[in-house]
Amino acid sequence: MTTEAMITEVVLPGVVEPDGLHLRRRAMPVPARGQALVQVEATGISFAEQQMRHDRYPGQPKFPFVPGYDLVGTVRAVGPGADDSLVGARVAAVTKTGGWATYALVDIDALTPVPAELDPAAAETVVVNGVTAWQMLRGAGLRAGQTILVHGANGGVGTVLVQLGRHLGLRVVGTAAARHHAALRELGVEPLDYRDPELAARVRELSPGGVDAVFDPVGGPGVRTSYGLLAPGGSLVVYGNAGAVDSGQSVVWVFVKLLSRLYTWNALPNGHRAGFYNFWAGHLTRRTAFRRRLRTDLGIVLDLLRQGVIVPQIAARYPLSEVSAALVFAETRSRAGKVVLEP
């Protein structure tokens, strides 16, 4: 790799419309000790980047920065002292930012091997989304034959979550716009319209005794309804705060109110559990253990993808140069699955 080599990356300069993103060219970075230079073959647009565009994602960097929560690519160089056999390996990584680029520097201990036969875009659909779904289902302590309710079943996490749920022998009820119902039925989901004013009654019709778990990415006022739909011993798992984006309130304040509500519900003597799933739990205080668990869980999910247990749900593919159009498309939520950028 020559000193004249350049990379292209997408820069989010501030709170802008999607067409306010711009492409930047700069010199190829050189990996330091403990780092790898990864040529990015697929990266995704998630709800996190949509929130970052509005400066409403907790803990996001100061503007300007390069978005990109996760990536799949091939190692092209490693830093001093690293194992040279890594060069040429296909890997996946969770980066939180920096993935929307043709090349990215990634810590070596954050890399997970990707089976060579997998399409990079297909693998990309399960990096963050698959780990999130797998860890939430495992944490809910569910058994085959039980019933779960998945809100946003057509989303990036939702489409993986419902497939893993069916694989584990669960009955899955999923909410989404009516245009997504046919696709959800093909995945074995019993779909309901999330805009139905009688949604709670519809769930009760399908599962009169309540559901054993609810997975909610919105975190708004609807969590009360979700909690009220639980069967004895059931779990409410909130894994997003999408309701805060359009609320006009401070994201931090909305999040604090949500956590307070969940904590209060957990104190009630009704056998229900309520909690917020935090993908990054332990990242700062137990980094080695966090990354080891992430590599293990992502490895499991990638193998399920390889086996065909998970069918990748790709809403659309765009080249990096069309990132603005890709972001517009992603924010319409008009097609189930994940929008993938292919640098």
Image: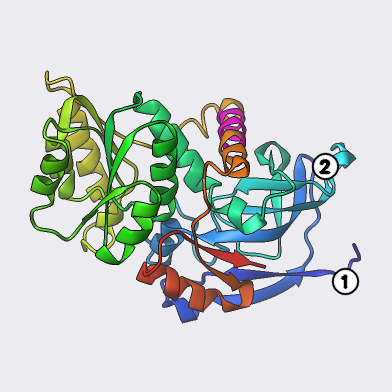
> Picture coordinates of residue 91 (x, y %)?
71, 46
Q: How far apart are marks 1 and 2 (CA)?
A: 24 Å
Task: Work out whether residue 257 or residue 163 is closer to the camera in this orientation and state it.
Answer: 163
> Picture coordinates of residue 267 (x, y %)?
16, 22
Q: Is residue 55 magenta?
A: no
Q: Residue at x 41, y 78 (%)?
A: 17
The image quadrant where one finds the N terminus is bottom right
Give the number of marks: 2
The answer to whether 287 appears left or right of 156 in the picture is right
Location of residue 143 with respect to 42 vertically, above or below: above
> Picture coordinates of residue 94 (x, y %)?
58, 46
Name which residue type carries label 1.
Glu
Name which residue type carries label 2.
Leu
**Residue placed farthest to the bottom in the image?**
19
Q: Residue 164 carries which label?
A: none
- Report which residue position mark 2 lands on: 86
Task: Please tell me whether mark 2 sits on a helix, a strand or a loop.
Answer: helix
The answer to whether 189 appears left or right of 209 in the picture is right
Location of residue 261 with respect to 91 vertically, above or below: above
Task: Work out whether residue 275 or residue 29 is closer to the camera in this orientation and state it.
Answer: 275
Q: What stretch is highlighted in magenta?
A: 290-299
Q: Which residue is drawn at 53% across and 67% down?
A: 64
- Report which residue position mark 1 lands on: 4
Camera-side mark, 1 or 2 = 2
